Image: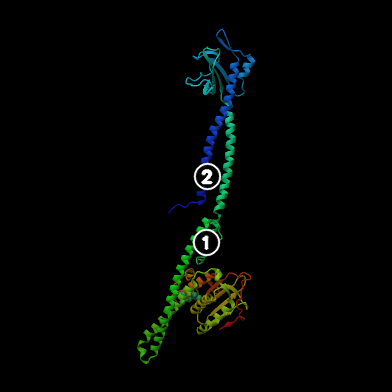
Amino acid sequence: MNKLRSLKHQMLLSLSLPLVFFVVADSVLSYYVTQHYVNETYDRWLTDSAKSLIQEIRVRQDMVSVELPPVALEMFKWDEEDKIHFKIVSAEYALLAGDAIVPDPPLQVEDWSVPVVYDASLNGEPARVVSIRIELRSGAEPVFVCVAETKNKRRTMMRDFLLVDLVTQLLLVMLTGFYLLAGTRHGLQPLQVLAGQVARRSPRELSPISDIETFIEVRTLTDTINDLLGQLRQAVETQNRFIANAAHQLRTPLAGLKIQAERVLREPGAIAYAPALLQIRDCADRLSHLTSQLLVLAKSEPIKGGSELEPVDLHGLSREICMEWAPLALQRQMELAFDGPGHPVLVAGDATLLRELLGNLLDNAIRYGFERGNVSVVLQEWPQPKLTVSDDGPGIPDSEIGRVFERFYRLGPGTGCGLGLAIVKEIADLHRARIELGRGEQGSRGTRIEVAFPALPAGAAGNAQASPECCSSK
Ligand SMILES: Nc1ncnc2c1ncn2[C@@H]1O[C@H](COP(=O)(O)OP(=O)(O)OP(=O)(O)O)[C@@H](O)[C@H]1O
Ligand SMILES: [Mg+2]
């Protein structure tokens, strides 16, 4: 698998590398430019010194000397940081005056009409030397006047300039770095917002992501995700439509099969085939139950946004369904009680699916509860609408609690197809309701299933129908 990399780090790296390169290139350039100007400035001073020295050269009886009072000579040589020496040499480099330690003028110089400045060493120290060729008398041999100066001043000046330059560069890098960091973070924020929007969605929420983003790049990503969501929505809808159609198509022949089996059973000569016919009828019954459960499952699966749910009165609906299931409870001599607040309790929902949810819970409670047992449906309004169906039957073993919501998962023998609780879960998820499965009212036995719905926002009550007072049935 490819190593996961951070886009932010990648962007920072690609922006910082050129920055570092430019800073280094600029520093190198600064070094040479500073060196050039420092040399130019001090070279000019050195040349001026050499020229002023030339004014003081005298020739007496072929002897060359610099006629400077000792104080003036002292002043000429005096410098706080550097050592300055001069010498006058003949065309053959014979010392005529001054200090021998001053380096000789260079040999290969094409143009001596201007002072020649060059690097050399003075007593082992790096120095700068200026050499001027002059003719002391017209027609006489030319002589060279060389003035050498160590480079301490230049070094100090270079260091000061470069230090200022470096500090400025560092400040610039820090400011740019800070700006880059803030800019990258700010630039990537729309992606984080988009990621948050996608992450907050439930798996069934395949509605398009809203187009609030104004950045082209993010909009392109949003469009691509929306295209994908659209295709996924279509695929899921096609699959659900197929299941619903298949289930629907199966219903009629199954009903026919059951009727035919019952009709043959009533025939006088059918006694010999009664067990087989009864099995055919029961199988048709079970198949028909399976197809209706599949139909409900397919209906509860369509990809819907919360906005398609409407206010439903859970109180009236629960009461109605309890009454519908009362005959089956009576058949098993069970007591089925409903307890509600006595006034409408509104939730955002789909009435048909909510009927299926409660119907499946009641079916289980009545089917799996003990004969002559108790089944109760309690509707609470506060702090949030909560429907609780409990029985005092054998209950679901703790080890199975995590699995009973899986599709086609059943415990022990029975006529069910293992889809009831899966349907309950699908419908609860669709309503963003929380399901809790626990022990019945007695605490140690029975089953209690709570479905807690999110409270309806104030003002969303719409025009849901009020229901009559709560009831209890046996
Ligand atoms: N109230 C209950 N008491 C005891 N066991 C239960 C109860 N409700 C569910 N169960 C167990 O959980 C299993 C799964 O229930 P579920 O409703 O999903 O499927 P089913 O009832 O077998 O089939 P279907 O509801 O699709 O006809 C059941 O087989 C049953 O053993
Ligand atoms: Mg069931």
Q: Earlier in the sequence, mark 1 or mark 2?
A: 2
Query: In the picture provided, is 355 more to the left or to the right than 238?
Result: right
Rate crowding at label 2 as few (under 14), some (14 to 19) or many (20 or more) other CA atoms within 10 Å.
some
Dot 2 beta carbon under 8 Å from ligand 1: no
- The quarter of the picture where the C terminus appears is bottom right
- Tell me, yes or no, whether the two marked residues, 1 and 2, touch with CB atoms within 8 Å: no
As displayed, is residue 350 above or below residue 142?
below
Measure the alpha-carbon separation of dots 1 and 2: 32 Å
Question: In the image shown, does 17 or 380 lie closer to the viewer?
Answer: 17
> Which residue matches tag 1?
198
Q: Measured from the top left, where is residue 439 in percent x and y?
A: 53, 72
Q: Give the amino acid at mark 2.
A: Ser
Dot 1 beta carbon under 8 Å from ligand 1: no
As displayed, is residue 170 above or below residue 7?
above
Question: In the image shown, does 155 or 415 lie closer to the viewer?
Answer: 155
Rate crowding at label 1 as few (under 14), some (14 to 19) or many (20 or more) other CA atoms within 10 Å.
some
Farthest residue to the bottom: give it: 268
Residue at disc 2, secondary structure: helix
Residue plotted at (56% across, 23% down): 150
Residue at disc 1, secondary structure: helix
Residue 414 can be seen in this image? no
Q: Give the amino acid at mark 1.
A: Val
Q: Measured from the top left, where is residue 182 in percent x and y?
A: 57, 49
Q: Measured from the top left, where is residue 429 in percent x and y?
A: 52, 69
Question: In the image shown, does 25 or 328 lie closer to the viewer?
Answer: 25
> Which residue matches tag 2?
16
Farthest residue to the right: give it: 71
- The quarter of the picture where the N terminus appears is bottom left
Residue 53 can be seen in this image? yes
Please tell me in which quadrant of the rendered image residue 413 appears: bottom left
Q: Measured from the top left, where is residue 271 in percent x and y?
A: 36, 89
Please tell me in which quadrant of the rendered image residue 452 appears: bottom right
